[in-house]
Image: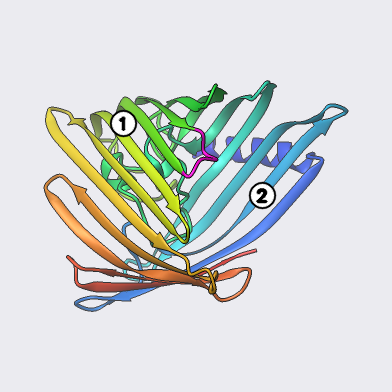
Amino acid sequence: MKKITFLLILFINIIVFADEIIINKELSLVGGYGDNFFTETMHHQNSIGFEYFGKHSNDYGDFLATDLQLRIAHNFEKETTTLEIHNAWLEYKLGLGKFIRLGHFALAFGIEKVKDTHATLWQTNAMKNVGFKQDWGVGYRSFWNNFDYEFAAQIGSGMAFRKDGYLFSSRINTNSTKSLQFAISSLYGKIHKSMGMATYPLSSSMKISKKRIGFELQYEYADFKFMNEIAFGYDNDTEILSGFSEWDYTPFVFQDLKLIVQYKYFDETSNWNFGGAYKLCETITFSTLYELKENRILCQIYFFG
């Protein structure tokens, strides 16, 4: 916990002296019904937090960006409160489209890298496939011709901070401005087995060896967006296959509404999700999701602004 506190103080001090600062407040209210009512899921608990983004610049433009995003989550069933650190990074611009990043940030693996699921019910397979979405470490990103690429070396502990693991990931994708995009990514490491989303209290000390290679395809056509990912590899000596597809439809005449269908496959288990999201105003979104396999419905009200 001392290391986490030191890092937070460091980031806050760096951001305070930024030339440009953006502060947003965040509130997430989650609930659902299956066999009974519940107020938390594998990915979400009722929470309140903030995001603190800053940019440093000189006579030649901005050269350093920082982001700190925290939230306090409460589990009403277990009556527990946890701290969740999401973004806690600084990124230095080396020039010529090259960036180096340090802190707590997303892995360079899979469609989770480009689909930010921090604030939504609509999740990828990242939590099952890897165990967490972000980790502590250092990363590098740049581009070459029509390709973007990224590498990351991280400690394999997710939101918590443990030193006796490691995780290397890499991702290369075709230009993100194109309507049709392809990507390939890889992951290798010995990571701490996640027991939840909390940064503190710490997650399990159990470790697992992971190897993955993944392929992605994204396509946008008119009011539709398609995202697909397949990944395979090993957890220790156990073969793992993961598949994810999402189809989004945003009506041209009703841009505040998004209808969503998902198909997920992981380790011989599959599930369909149906539902959507509606922007009640600029800062508030209402989402609902029906899980066919679990026969349950989830709802969320999310405020960010």
| Quadrant placement of the C terminus | bottom right
In the rendering, at what x and y percent does residue 189 appear? 31, 25
Q: Which span of residues is magenta-colored?
A: 175-179
- Whether residue 178 is in magenta: the answer is yes
Q: Quadrant of residue 292?
A: bottom left
- Whether residue 4 is in magenta: the answer is no
Q: Which mark is residue 128?
A: none
Q: Which mark is residue 191?
A: 1
Question: Closer to the N terminus: mark 2 or mark 1?
Answer: 2
In the rendering, at what x and y percent does residue 196 appear? 33, 50
The foreground one among 40 and 7 is 40
The color scheme shown is: rainbow
Looking at the image, residue 270 lies above or below residue 194: below
The foreground one among 185 and 194 is 185
* Residue reaching furthest to the front: 222
Residue located 30% across and 51% down the image? 245
Q: Which residue in the protein does label 2 denote? A: 52
- Distance from disc 2 to disc 1, alpha carbons, whole Å, reads 28 Å
Residue located 17% across and 65% down the image? 293
Residue located 19% across and 77% down the image? 35
Q: Look at label 1 and name its amino acid.
A: Ile
In the rendering, at what x and y percent does residue 139 appear? 52, 26
Can residue 166 be seen from the camera position used here? yes
The foreground one among 25 and 250 is 250
Residue located 48% across and 45% down the image? 179
Looking at the image, residue 109 lies above or below residue 45: above
Looking at the image, residue 217 lies above or below residue 262: above
